[in-house]
Amino acid sequence: MPNYTRSVAVLIETGDSWGRNVVEAVARYAQKSRWALVISPRDEDGRLRLPHRWQGDGAVAMLRDVPMARSLQAAAIPVVDVDVLMRQETWVGRVVTDDRVRIAMAFEHFRSKNFTHFACFAPHVNRYPDQRSQLFQQVARKAGFYCCGFDKLERNELGWYADPQLVAHWIRSQPSPLAVFAPDPVPARQLAEICQWEGIHIPDEVAILAGDTDDLLCSIASPPISSVELDCARIGHEACALLHRMMNGRPAPKHPKLIPPLRVIARHSTEILAVADQEIGDVLRFIRSHACEGIRVPDILKLYPISRRTLEQKFQAILGRTPSEEIRRTRLEQARNLLVDSELPISSIATKCGFSSSVELSHAFRKYLGIKPSDLRPQR
């Protein structure tokens, strides 16, 4: 192959947005590096497998089962895994989403809506690890809130054949309003459909958030489902960079490279403020409408007949943060969205979001989010 430096197989399902976006990033890297790609090759049974008699240099794969892992291992080529289902396969390199950050984002999104009752809907299927829903429950309980998991009930009734009435009974037995985390868009949409069939209102009775984004499933659900947006472009790029090093003789790292998600995309399934105090609810809506206009707490006090001390006490009791912290959180969330969705310069985004300069915005990102604004720019 005189025109190519390497031949690389890409064993990733492309039936959802995540897979397609990762493969797209791999293809961009391959084009720059002059790699020849074999994308989603399958055997006679339709399973992702290396082609017969293919003599390549490496693979980027989404390991899902032991036979797939064994077939790749038998090929004696460097492999980078972009999934976490086969953690026991320590011979591969691994580039994956940081689940702790994913869960923290999901939980914080629910808390920003003032939910205090939480649950996980995680049918036992081969799409995501059980640890994802377990981690969400741990985070919620550590914060002092109620949280349960549907995966603990009658396991023989779970999976894609979960009895809608059983699921509806479980939901109705929980406190309301209930914030439900689903590990990815498939169970999230399944739950939304069951709620629709059983007359359970979303988001008034149940709010749903998916731990991953699928453009089709999340948008066509009724109502559209909020979701965590993963940095697929960076996962694909970093997987290729690691594979490049491994094909040049470097060993597979002992620990995975963790890629933080980009943000939560808020859709109608969580579009509610679970605040019984009408005055505080009004203040929150005001903050979320005007935070980027440079408002401060005195501006709130001019509009609402409440003392600063009472306002601070109510915010702490209801949200666990001060009004100033809520203003800052809202500004940072808007800045995060503009960094992902637009090509505006960081200085312009800073101004649009109520920061005095790009320096102040960068300082706030590092201090409160632990990242730089440039980290959210798409890999090109």
Image: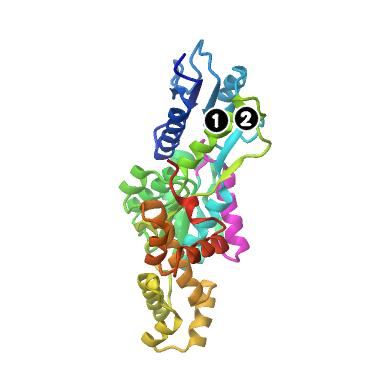
Residue pictured at 50% horizontal, 49% vertical = 261
Amino acid type, label 1 = Leu
Quadrant for the C terminus in the image? top left
Residue 6 pos. (x, y %): 51, 21
Please tell me in which quadrant of the rendered image residue 243 appears: top right
Number of numbered tags placed on the structure image: 2
Q: Nearer the viewer, residue 225 or 49?
A: 49
Instruction: Say if residue 167 shows up in the picture.
Output: yes
Q: Which residues are magenta?
A: 123-146
Callouts 1 and 2 close, C-beta under 8 Å: yes
Residue pictured at 60% horizontal, 21% vertical = 77
- Residue 92: which numbered mark, if any? 2
Residue 369 pos. (x, y %): 54, 60
- Is residue 145 within the magenta segment? yes
Residue 192 pos. (x, y %): 38, 51
> Mark 2 falls on what kind of element?
loop
| Disc 1 residue crowd, few under 14, some 14–19, many 20+, Cα 10 Å | many
Q: Is residue 251 toward the left or the right of residue 193 in the image?
A: right
Please tell me in which quadrant of the rendered image residue 289 appears: bottom left
- For label 1, the residue is 63
- Residue 210: which numbered mark, if any? none
- Is residue 331 positioned above or below 311 on the image? above
> Mark 1 falls on what kind of element?
loop
